[in-house]
Amino acid sequence: MRKLLKHGFKESWLEVVILNACVIVSSIVLFIGIATAQMFLLTIGTAVFIGALASAGVIILMSISRSFHKKLFTNEGYLTLTTPVSLDKLLLSKIIVNMIWIFATVFSFAISIFIMYAGIIILAGPAASFIFGVLVELIAQNPLSFILGIITFLASVLFFLTALLFIIVLFNTGHKKRFKILKGILLYYAFGIVFTMISYAVAYFLLFYPITRTVVTIVIMLGLSVAFYFLSRFVIMRKLELE
């Protein structure tokens, strides 16, 4: 597993590192621009930050899709699947690597926001720091909600990765290869609609129990993630048996 993780990071680090570097550098430029009231730096920093924010989803999605596809449905993937490496280790290593890249990207955006906020505090004085104080106070008053929010985010990332894995597996093992990307997007949105309907049903029946509602939503996402994983595994194993 360690070698698979190491190889997974080595083959997918470049675009993610460049994206996160652009986010951090642009936030530092914005920090300097805000603190010194330099319009040129504000303009450059804002343009780069918005560009990185707009392209983050596309870059991460392309990186994840390529990593799944390359290791499963190319010549390299075929050779990998014929080695003693188990399919579970291969799939889990890909999911772990992609989860870490998503967390790293979210963390870099969070850090960049704090950097820019520090510039606002320098410009406006201590009075501007009340927002941070309010945020800390809200977390201190509702630690369980904060923890559940983090777990919900983790579960939603896992749901996204396993659903994407299942879609990629499904459209690379079927006989009809035309319009795979379009069909994959439509299928993912269909999964999203089904999950949203389930979430609304849970919210309706547990309207006055927000903590319970959140826990049930997390359980549903984790259950669907497990289902997508084992469905993907079944389809891949079936394909290997037929070949």
Image (tube, grey):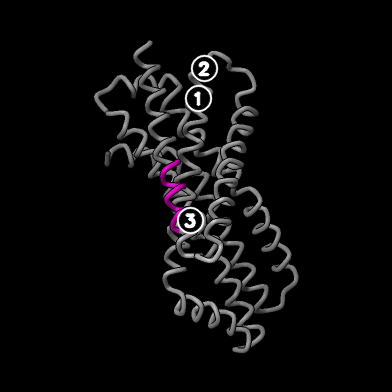
Q: Please provide percent x and percent y for residue 171.
A: 53, 23
Residue hosting label 1: 170
Q: Please provide percent x and percent y for residue 138.
A: 51, 78
- Position of 141 relative to 187 (above/below): below
Secondary element at tag 3: helix
Q: Which of marks 1 and 3 is nearer the N terminus?
A: 3
Residue closest to the eye, 58 or 184: 184
Secondary element at tag 1: helix
Q: How crowded is mark 1: few (under 14 residues within 10 Å), some or many (20 or more)?
A: some
Residue hosting label 2: 174
Instruction: Identify the residue at image location x=45%, y=21%.
Output: 74
Give the Cα separation between the discs numbered 1 and 3: 26 Å
Marks 2 and 1: CB-CB under 8 Å? yes
Extreme residue toward the front, this view: 205
Secondary element at tag 2: loop
- Position of 238 relative to 57 (above/below): above
Position of residue 60 in the picture relative to residue 226 (left or right)? right
Residue closest to the eye, 218 or 78: 218
**Amino acid type at image mark 1:** Leu
Q: What stretch is highlighted in magenta?
A: 215-224
Residue hosting label 3: 153
